[in-house]
Amino acid sequence: MTSLSPELEAFRDRVVAFMDPHVAEYGQAARLGLSLDDDIALARRWQATKAAAGYAGLTFPTEYGGAGLTQLEQVIFVAEEAARGFPAGYFVISLSMPIPMMLRYATPEQKARFVPPALRGEQIWSQLFSEPSTGSDLAAVRTRAVRDGEDWIISGQKVWTTFAQYSDYGVIVARTDPDAPKHRGLTYFFVDLKAQGVTVRPIRQLHSAAEFNEVFFDDVRVPDAWRLGGVGDGFRLAVETLMIERYTAAADETGFGPPLDALISLAREAQLDGRPALEDGRVRAVIAQAYATQQGLLAISEKSILELAAGREPGPEGSIHKLVGARGRREVALCALDLLGTDGLRFDAAAHPRPKTDFAMSWMDQPTLRIAGGTDEMLLNTVAERILGLPQDYRPDKLPR
Ligand SMILES: Cc1cc2nc3c(=O)[nH]c(=O)nc-3n(C[C@H](O)[C@H](O)[C@H](O)COP(=O)(O)OP(=O)(O)OC[C@H]3O[C@@H](n4cnc5c(N)ncnc54)[C@H](O)[C@@H]3O)c2cc1C
């Protein structure tokens, strides 16, 4: 990684000294074979351990239990955590989107009530934006919220809601004015996902785990005090929520798949025509291509670290990172599955294998990365318009520029 200042190197040393004694309990090896439920329970304990040591919410203000540090320290911490395979992913949505939005816009009472427990891993938050007819086009939300005295009554359906079955609360955008232009009739609320009228139905995925859900709202009562921002301001806040899902420079060059070394080891052991597969030109080409791609992505990560260090927000490089990383992961996983032969089909779904360590899981899970957080097509548009400066794609729901 880019050379860091002595202060940041000292911070990294402190982080390493804090993490290493916990590797046996929370690291990659400890998690292998755990069910999703058990892994989430382990993740809650790791989050509480971090909070007790002052490492939860590194960029959050100290008055709400955070460490008051910069995005750069956060990047260093996340990279060290990822290198050890600690279970932090279950809190990424809570702590990257809903809670930072609350810190920006909620009342002091709401912040005091929700932020410290979320940092300690006692609450998980969901983001309820997508609907059956609304994903990329966020402004087309149909779920309604109708004012009733001091409350709002919410009815409708959300979908693809990550970890809703484990969540206590969520942020939601609902249509409060059906007569206003579609970008202006939405409002942003907190919702209690255990409230009467909320039904969460897990969706089983190809690899058998259910990491996202359908969520139904059947006349769910939400106090007006749980509205974030003004009535009609929901689209702007939803877009801001997605924007503060900052591109972390620690983003993984493998597109969250197994490291390239795992493919190289496999190719050393596997035989092709009586010789180690590592000597085969086609296998070597996949490895060389993946290596070159990962070096390119690493250079992009380093650039954004420097941007952060200089106090600037990284630009649209994150779009390239996700787009290219996800495609590279598919090629590496396919090659590994070919080399594993029938062994590649031995998939124990009950053991909750992880995309980062298991090639079959990595291959089955990789399409999700090409949809979640902006589809490939949307990211290609971002690259075309914001990096290459090409004319804007046709937007039938907007006036031409
Ligand atoms: C693993 C995973 C987790 C998710 N978690 C959450 C969550 O926690 N909360 C949440 O709210 N949502 C979540 N989502 C939903 C995700 O945000 C949407 O799936 C995504 O925004 C795409 O929307 P869509 O599925 O409605 O597809 P659509 O928007 O209907 O798109 C369908 C196809 O049309 C293309 N397309 C659409 N518009 C354009 C355009 N303007 N230009 C070019 N092509 C276009 C798309 O690229 C795609 O190929 C998750 C999705 C996944 C896969």
Image (cartoon, rainbow, N blue to C red):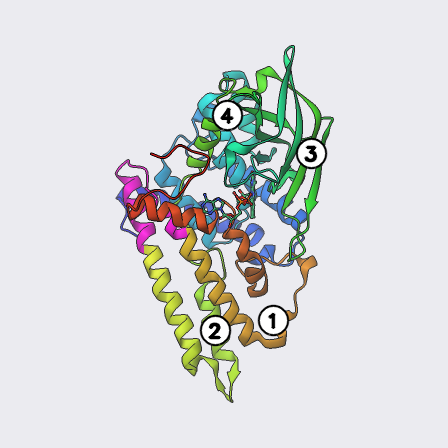
Q: What stretch is highlighted in magenta?
A: 299-321
Give the SS element for disc 2: helix
Give the percent coordinates (x, y) of residue 144: 62, 25
Give the SS element for disc 1: helix
Crowding around mark 1 (Cα neighbors within 10 Å: few <14, some 14 to 19, many 20+) is some
Give the SS element for disc 3: strand
Magenta stretch, main secondary structure, is: helix
Mark nearest the camera among 4 and 1 is 4
Read off the residue under disc 4: 234
Crowding around mark 3 (Cα neighbors within 10 Å: few <14, some 14 to 19, many 20+) is some
Read off the residue under disc 1: 344
Residue at coordinates 52% horizontally, 18% vertically from top-left?
231
Q: Is residue 206 left or right of residue 88?
A: right
Give me the C-alpha separation between circle 4 and circle 1. Answer: 46 Å
Read off the residue under disc 3: 216
105 versus 311 height, above or below: above
Read off the residue under disc 2: 265
Q: In terms of sequence position, does the residue under pointer 2 or pointer 4 come before the other?
A: 4
| Residue 16 visible in the displayed image | no
Q: Which amino acid does label 4 sit on?
A: Gly
Give the percent coordinates (x, y) of residue 364: 58, 60
Give the percent coordinates (x, y) of residue 280: 43, 82
Q: In terms of sequence position, does the residue under pointer 1 or pointer 2 come before the other?
A: 2
Crowding around mark 2 (Cα neighbors within 10 Å: few <14, some 14 to 19, many 20+) is few
Q: What residue type is labelled 1?
A: Gly
Give the SS element for disc 4: helix
Mark 4 and 1 residues: CB-CB less than 8 Å, in contact? no
